[in-house]
Amino acid sequence: MLKKSGIITVISLLLLAFACSKKAKQELKKSDKFANGKPIEYEIEDNGKFVDIEVYTKIKPYLEVISKSYDSVKYFCVLDTNYFFYVSNGTKKGVVDKHGKVIVPVKYSKIFNPGGTVKGLIEVEDYKKFGLYDLEGNVVAEAKYEAIYPVDFSGAVVQVKLNGKFGVITSEGAETFDEASFDNPDAFVSPYLTKASLAWKFDVNSKDIVFLQPVNYKQYKDDLVEGRAVVFTPSYLFELGFLPQQIERIVIEKETDFGIAESKAKVTEVTSIWDGLLAAFAEYYEVGLDARGYETNKTNLVTMDSAGKIISMVEYYKPYMYSYPCGDKADMFKTRFVDSSLFEVKTYQYSYDTKSQDTTYDTYPEFFYYWIDSTGEITELSSQRRFAFTQFLVIDESYLRGCYAKFVNDDGEKNAVINEHLTIEDLEVMKNEIYADYGMIFTKQKWKNYFGKRKWYRGKLKNVDDLLTDVDRKNIAFITATIEKVKANPDDYVSTSEGTIPIVP
């Protein structure tokens, strides 16, 4: 479920954009004007063979002329009464309007959506060097910067990075890296150090984002309708590594049967870890339409230096937890730094098949751990223990409480038995598996049978006390004391209730 990714590029971010607006069918018949905002709602006409969308009829005369001057025309969008076409000659790309006026010269390796990075501007890339144009074709920032970041500094258009240094493009169009020339000192510091990145958010359905659409789209009559809009992820956002470079098949019609209905991203935390190093958390959420629909919800942990250079990243799935039998009582998903080097992820497993697992529960909390060394490299830690936390840190009562539910029948609304604390049996397993991890040979038949069924267990030592770590010893003492407390006052610890586990086919 969890996987480690290698080095990626820059973290955390927001997207403020710009967009084409929806018009009702009757409005399309009355006027060719399209207000900025949401995508156009198209009128469908049946010509017998396929359904052609009205706007494609409108762009056809412009497209026929423009196509003669370029190798290809792939995308277009509508802003007010103007059409913008994304053209290319060979591998070089640019943008022209409906009259053929060059808005972005055909010399770039990539052209992003209007408003994707900064409202009213088009970001361009010349092989990892980034710049900006306005919608009139004026250069706002030459394509020479290592990164371009949206900002809310008064008097600034964007924050930029050049040769590892941070500066701004002012509202007057001037580039400055001189702190004396601009009022806000944060403009000359990494946006991760100032935590400006926490304000960065991306929502593909934002009214500000201009969707691009393929110029040759045709929907065949009676076919299922697919999303067709495209958004190129802004460079600073893509560098986080948790978004695809290009988001396709975005739904722009209510009747759409297939496509992406929602796509959101945000930075939730930036924190200092080792001296001079930062860690950030970035979340991504997506909802798609298909035969059954799907939902993706994942989080990245990224480490970087103070200049924002990415060192390492791990990506882990954040599951959709339905309603869950314990409801709001359970911490369904939680992350934290135990210290500068140890990162903890708490999530919940959900399964009816417990026969092959080291657990008697169908719903239960599970913990995962990552080690961050002094250089910022992240390594996922593995454990053969069912209760992995006993291996990596000294535990307390919070690790014994949670949502432990067992599916018991198919009848009625209440189909599960729920414990909100581990039982004595669970605690005894937790304690003895610490010894088993070091290969202790058990004398009690109960534990011989239990660990004999574990593929990882190799009994070879009568005594493993010398192999135990300080963490092991403290946890054994805590578990032993807790077992006695539970025996003395069981109602204070283990109470059983009924609940419902959602049945998933």
Image: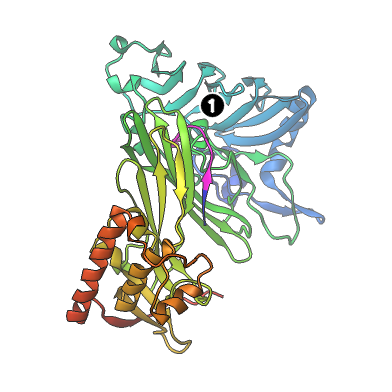
Q: Nearer the viewer, residue 194 or 358?
A: 358
The region drawn magenta spans 4-16
| Residue occupying image coordinates x 35% and y 53% | 392
Furthest residue to the bottom? 411
The vertical placement of 330 against 271, above or below, is below
- The image position of residue 498, as x and y in percent, is 34, 83
The vertical placement of 243 against 345, above or below, is above
Report the side of 457 relative to 414 (left or right): right
Report the side of 211 relative to 492 (left or right): right
Report the side of 233 relative to 299 (left or right): right
- Give amino acid for label 1: Glu
| Residue occupying image coordinates x 57% and y 63% | 293
Q: Main structural element of the magenta stretch: helix, strand or loop?
A: loop
Q: Nearer the viewer, residue 116 or 255?
A: 116
Q: Is residue 356 visible?
A: yes
| Residue occupying image coordinates x 60% and y 45% | 28
Look at the numbered disc 1 and give the secondary structure of its residue. Answer: strand
472 is within the stretch colored magenta? no
The vertical placement of 1 against 454, above or below, is above
Q: Quadrant of the C terminus?
A: bottom right
| Residue occupying image coordinates x 29% and y 55% | 471
- The image position of residue 45, as x and y in percent, is 72, 53
